[in-house]
Image (cartoon, rainbow, N blue to C red):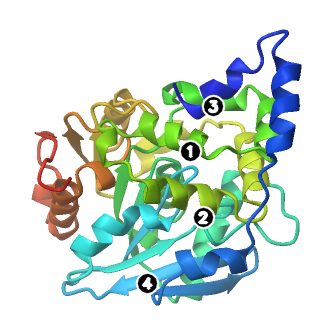
Amino acid sequence: MSFLRLFLIFAVPGVLLINVLYLSVHWTRDLSLEQLLPTYASEASTFVEIPSARVHVRDEGASAHDTPPIVMLHGLGDSLHTFEPWVDRLESDFRVVRLDLPGFGLTGPFADDETDYGMANHLRFLRDTLDALDIERIDLLGHSLGGWYAWRFALAYPERVRRLVLVAAAGYPEHVGDTLEQARSAPFLRSLLRNVTPRNLIEQGLRDAIADDRIITDAMIDQRYDLLLRADNRDALALRLDVDWDDAHLRIPEITTPTLLMWGTEDHWIPSAAADNFAADLPDATLVRYDGIGHMPMLEAPDRSAEDLRRFLLADAAVANAAPVIATPETDAR
């Protein structure tokens, strides 16, 4: 059972008041940026000033090939740390740029009391961040929510994206996991989560996302929990969940950028059927499925998925259009 489903239980008549009274004495306080920096910033961390935010960025590696930087966008409730296994495996050959999206990680919320977490502001955020880094053309990778932003950026700025990688990407309203839809339909519980956030809710969310929960560690849970508590991140999350779906998925066939789709067959957050939609709608797509893997192939199958990513970034057009393949779960990386 996911953490959001657990919260929905509290809505049962006759139990709600008792639970609210109980949770009121378990208030979860914010953590300041200064408290988090010693643990979650590194020597590779920089903070880039743009009009809408102060963006936490890690710019690592160096391209040994004639390829642009690969920019990685994380998913809901996550941070740039989630891509660490891929950076370890790719930085010797590629320049890898990761960033914390607005309302997540060390970036924190949009500046100046901005409350609009819609798509237009996120596309402007990414454009301004790339401009501040003096990066014009990129290979763009997005996971889950970050995948939604990635394909929308490729649609809005096709001249800036050489190759696109969508990892369990959002974008089709009909393929949203039950957990997210339950959160969107329960505004009172979202409000409660702004102030009461037990650590075990984060652990349960990871267990929902990852097929083999043996790879889940206390450090993995603590990282996501601490960064969620970064001042104002929970408020931003609630605002983001209020954003309605639009019909931009109808324009996916307009994206001609060569695209790699990476999907676990056991993904319960964004089901594998969404991969079929992307594969059918995108004119130039390669689909790789990971058998027995859940929502996070970068953590669950790091060696295999990093190698698939490497091949795609270096492939010519003929290889990029190769037939879909089935990948098996890894055991050596666990």
- Residues at badges 1 and 3 in contact (C-beta under 8 Å)? no
Residue matched to label 3: 4
Q: Indicate the secondary structure of the residue bearing disc 1.
A: helix
Residue 227 in view, yes or no: yes
Give the foreground label among 2 and 3: 3
The image position of residue 271, as x and y in percent, is 40, 29
Q: Is residue 221 toward the left or the right of residue 38 in the image?
A: left
Residue 171 in view, yes or no: no
Tell me the distance, in whole angstroms, between the alpha carbons under discs 4 and 1. Answer: 28 Å
- From this viewpoint, which residue is outermost toward the top? 13
Q: At x 16% / y 55%, what residue is drawn?
A: 304
Tell me the distance, in whole angstroms, between the alpha carbons under discs 1 and 3. Answer: 10 Å
Residue matched to label 1: 202
Residue toward you, 39 or 73: 39
- Checking the image for residue 59, the label placed there is 4
- Which badge, 4 or 3, is on the more N-terminal residue? 3
Give the foreground label among 4 and 3: 3
- Checking the image for residue 101, the label placed there is 2
Q: At x 53% / y 49%, what residue is drawn?
A: 145
- Which badge, 2 or 4, is on the more N-terminal residue? 4
Tell me the distance, in whole angstroms, between the alpha carbons under discs 2 and 4. Answer: 15 Å
Q: Residues within 10 Å of mark 3 (few under 14, many from 20)?
A: many
Res 272 → quadrant: top left
- Residues at badges 2 and 3 in contact (C-beta under 8 Å)? no
- Which badge, 1 or 3, is on the more N-terminal residue? 3
Residue toward you, 41 or 52: 41
The image position of residue 261, as x and y in percent, is 30, 47
235 w.r.t. 128: above or below: above
